[in-house]
Amino acid sequence: MLSPKDSPLGKQLSQYVCLRITRLDDVDVGLFERDWNNTIYFFAFNADEKIYFRYGGRDSASPDTYLNVDSLELALRQGLQMHEQYLGGALKLPERPKALFPREIPLLVQRTFAQRQCVECHLIGDFQNLQRQQDGVLDKLTHLYRSPDIKTIGIELDVPKGLVVKQATGAAQAAGMKAGDRIVTWNGAPVVTFGDLQYQYDKVDRKAAKLTVQVDRGESLQITLPPRWWWTDLRFRQSSVDPRLDFEDRPLTAEEKSKLGLPPDGIASQVKYVSEFAKIRKTHDLRTGDIIYAVDGVERDEIANTAELFLKLRKKAGESATLGVIRSGQRIQMPLHSYQLSFRK
């Protein structure tokens, strides 16, 4: 980073050995494991390859929601303190993550090394998922819907102050979280930055019903996770395993379903947006306001609460389906052809 050496940030950075990784051909990406759909990401670690903190992370609204010079400076100060504690034997750090090199991902090798192309950051996560899909071990809840949004459980951070809570609502407030609390552990793991928090949140079992968060006033809070707490908007992600659909929807309310004679626990949803490319790509003939009540004859799902989510979870990119649609009171069957995102490899 270009920061004046006499600036507060520059003074902190001068106490670190700063390295910028621009290609990952022979880098142990296991050590730097993270959500790879981030614009910028920092790791602070020591010569023993023990990580002090991660700095980065984002939400679906913006790549820099949680990036701030003040919070970075704060993290760097905390990292130096942790280093002194580690050298003095007062700080025990987790074992380094399991090693993983790009050459261990066969599909990535075919697209890069075999074609004498460099391995760039954005390729790692995408080809990990493509490899998982080919190997039959892709879990879309975990591998596609990464980095759950803390705002879904009612946590808003005062970003310049790191993990200090600006406002607590919803599930977080119900658990006893208050404005001014500083989060110190997330589901049992110590966290220093939002990057740490998001990394640990991403590791929570998607079937979990509770989450333990400790704050600096000594309270251990049990947060009840709402249904589909893991869901995030996927539009900003460059993911080849995400079926692209050219529409967005919203779940129908129980009252709306009742009026239409649809099951209360069904996936019925109303189309709220149709991409202008739907006709060009011949994805479907949906219109804003259409009600989708079934996909391939299926009206209920144990996880999905909308047709869009059902398709994302149950179909592979490029596969087709038949939608049950209600338009102007009439039920019709409509073909849908999802497509696979194609971007620079």
Image (cartoon, rainbow, N blue to C red):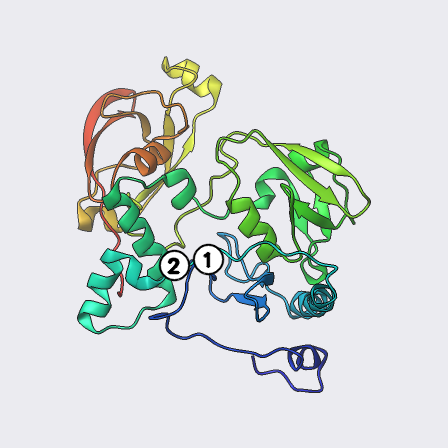
Quarter of the N terminus within the rendering: bottom right
- Label of residue 236 in the image: none
What residue is drawn where x is 64% and y is 58%? Answer: 193
Q: Secondary structure at mark 2?
A: loop
Task: Out of 34 and 166, give the one closest to the viewer.
Answer: 34
With respect to residue 84, does 231 lie above or below? above
- Residue holding disc 2: 100
187 horizontally vs 7: left or right: left
Q: Which residue is mark 1?
A: 33
Can residue 199 be spotted in the picture? yes
Q: Is residue 46 left or right of residue 81?
A: left
Residue at image point 78% right, 48% down: 216
Q: Are marks 1 and 2 in contact (CB under 8 Å)?
A: yes
What is the spatial separation of the Cα atoms under label 1 and label 2, in whole angstroms?
A: 9 Å
Quarter in which the C terminus is drawn: bottom left
Q: Residue at x 44, y 46 (%)?
A: 233
Instruction: Tell me residue 36's x, y (percent).
Output: 42, 58
In percent of the image, x 22 and y 25: which residue is there? Answer: 296
Tell me residue 325's x, y (percent): 27, 26
- What crowding class fits label 1: few (fewer than 14 Cα within 10 Å), some (14-19), or many (20 or more)? some
Residue 263 lies, in percent from the top left, at 39, 15
